[in-house]
Image: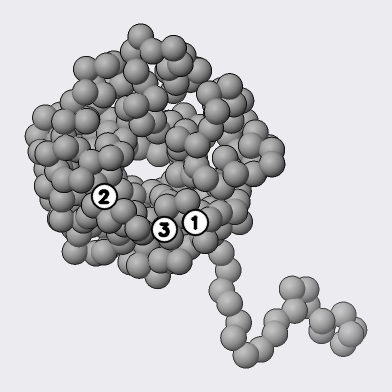
Amino acid sequence: MTDKLIIGGHEFNSRFILGSGKFSLELVKAVIEQGGAEMVTLALRRANVGGEENILDYIPEGITLLPNTSGARNAEEAVRIARLAREMGCGSFVKVEVIRDTRYLLPDNHETVRATEMLAKEGFIVMPYMYPDLNTARDLANAGAAAVMPLASPIGSNKGLSTRDFIKILIDEIDLPVIVDAGIGRPSQACEAMEMGAAAVMCNTAVATSSDVALMARAFKLAIQAGRGAYLACPGRVLEYSAEASSPLTGFLED
């Protein structure tokens, strides 16, 4: 009950962050509820005040909004999008995405650091999406990031923890929440990320492309909880070349 996720001084019970970019608006509420998510990302274009369909009308009260800077190609564009989101009432959290690469959609780490520094100085709670690189993560921490969000594999690929070893380095070396983002395709992969010591997992495509999105959201919720529990419990050692009985095989035989 006391194991809270703390980002920028705000406490969360759930460690499942839901991306809403690929859901029909009618499904958003059910997925949030079944997944137990307390933080939901949204693209600014889906929060058009006065438009016919506004995603904000479908998100339950009490949910923390995490607008992203999707579409930004440099730091200045990311800052402008973040400011617009705050003016529209989305709050001070922002997921910084700066992507110039249109083929692989890999984040521009250099521009991401620049945007993080500018937004942190303006009082935003900045959660930058990044390629998992230790030096970049250190630069982001120094720039004022509240968390780092390394990709597990390319956006939308559902390939899982392709960058597992690099994410583990960040978990071990960075004194910020490490939130695994992009490419997680199965609840079991989310569980593995949490067992490694990740602070949270963000997922969108894996849920949105399943045949039952609400059920898949619930599966991710349970997997993330299981992985967190396993991490806190400190899994037992692995025996490489021998076996050890879980119950004594001798003793009673000698009586």
Task: Give the answer, above or below, for where 184 lies relative to 51.
Answer: below
| Amino acid on which the number 3 mark rests in the picture | Pro
- Res. 218 in view: no
First in sequence: mark 2 vs mark 1: 2
Residue marked by disc 3: 154
Outermost residue, top direction? 50
Q: In this rendered view, identify the residue nearer to me: 20 or 65.
A: 20
Mark 1 Cα shell of 10 Å, populated few (<14), some (14-19), many (≥20): some
Q: Secondary structure at mark 1?
A: loop
Task: Give the answer, above or below, for where 205 lies relative to 244.
Answer: above
Q: In this rendered view, identify the residue nearer to me: 249 or 74.
A: 74
Residue marked by disc 2: 99
Residue marked by disc 1: 157
Q: Secondary structure at mark 3?
A: loop
- Which residue sits at x=36%, y=59%? 104
x and y percentages locating residue 109 in the rendered image: 21, 56
